[in-house]
Amino acid sequence: MSVSVARISGETLSTACDQRMFPDPVGHSGAVTPDRRALATVALACLLLTGIAACSEPEATDPAVSSRGPAAAPAPSGTALSEADRTEALAQASSGLEAVLSHDYAAYDDVLDEAAPFLSPRLASELEQLHEKTDQQVRKSRTSTEFTVVDKAVITGAGDTIKLLVFGNQVRRPKGQNPRLEAVTLFVTMTETNDEWLIEDLEGDGPVTDPDPDPERAEVADAASEFATAFNNIDHRTMDTDTEKVTELSTGRFRETYTEGLPSLKKLLRANRSVMQAEVTAAAVKDLSGDRATVLVATTGTVTNRTARKPVDRTQRLLVSLVNEDSAWLVDDLTYVS
């Protein structure tokens, strides 16, 4: 199994730092609440200017899951997925991940029984071997974990293979200590075995660049990726060009709010010599209906400013809303997934 759950995304959501950086979060359901929209300019300014090092302290890896690098998953082939396949794979992934990534240290063996129905034979065997090696260590650490899927969507898929992007939160409860809430971003490979979608592999890193065989979904994912790249790459030395790209790729209320906030944002960028660089590691279409769509986007990159003179790693989980105007997909809302 190729994922280290304890430090996948580098986020510790319980810190005050995160609350300043994410003034416009979505709830655990992933739904955008009407009274928390159109704050992306403020959020971006806070992200660029806040002392973010305190939010990125590395932690010891949870022994419940090992890390041995990304696995080589088969590339999707064959016909595009049906909506029924998407729905079933997403449901199986949610139940399986919550089973395999949650455990009570006092009943560690129960994880195997609860997770097995959702795992491919290879992954189930690997998990069993892992538990044999880590059983004593987990019981000695007296740490329990609870993993919850916050949001999920299909990145790409065809035939008997599906790649998913999953945003989850994991609560770690060391015995006698305060619980810690950690954001987790997972890339999940599902395979169809005996007419059932099973988890074949988990990865904690990207990028996932395979296009969706469905041309419209691929177009929507590309539009969300292009916007997220523009939004998350901004330099005080080239900010006019950088911010103009964001406005070109947006519309509606988002564009209006972003444009209104630009004078203040540019002033802060200059004063703090802020630079944010990022790349999209995956974009997954969550909903697509007519001329509207929502896309989950994961990014990774760095931030530097007067406070953080050396590049500080930064990952983000975004829910991007798009509308088709004159045959072009434009962003009309952006929300940070918490």
Image (cartoon, grey):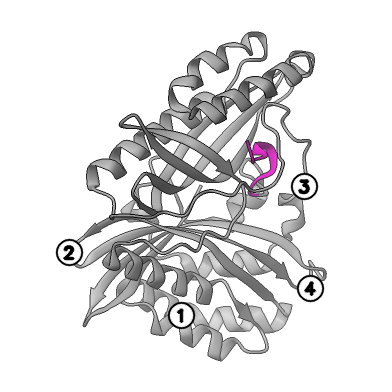
Q: Of label 2 and label 4, which has the lower sequence position?
A: 2
Q: In terms of sequence position, does the residue under pointer 2 or pointer 1 come before the other?
A: 1
Residue at image position (60%, 79%) is 234
Is there a contact, CB below 8 Å, between mark 1 and mark 3?
A: no
Number of the label disc, if any, that sits on residue 306 = 4
Q: Nearer the viewer, mark 3 or mark 4?
A: 3
Residue labelled with disc 2: 290
Between the residue at mark 2 and the residue at mark 1, the CA separation in whole angstroms equals 24 Å
**Amino acid type indicated by mark 1:** Val
Q: Which residue is mark 3?
A: 57
Residue range in magenta is 1-9
- Label 3, label 2: how many angstroms apart (C-alpha)? 43 Å
Per the model, the C-alpha gap separating discs 1 and 3 is 31 Å
Which image quarter: residue 247?
bottom left
Provide the residue designation for mark 1.
246
**Which element is circle 1 on?**
helix
Could you classify mark 3 by the number of other residues whose Cα lies within 10 Å: few (under 14), some (14-19), or many (20 or more)? few
Mark 2 or 4: the one toward you = 2
Q: CA distance from mark 4 to mark 1?
A: 24 Å
Q: CA distance from mark 2 to mark 4?
A: 45 Å
Is residue 125 located in the magenta-colored stretch of the structure? no
Q: Amino acid at mark 2?
A: Gly
Q: Amino acid at mark 3?
A: Glu
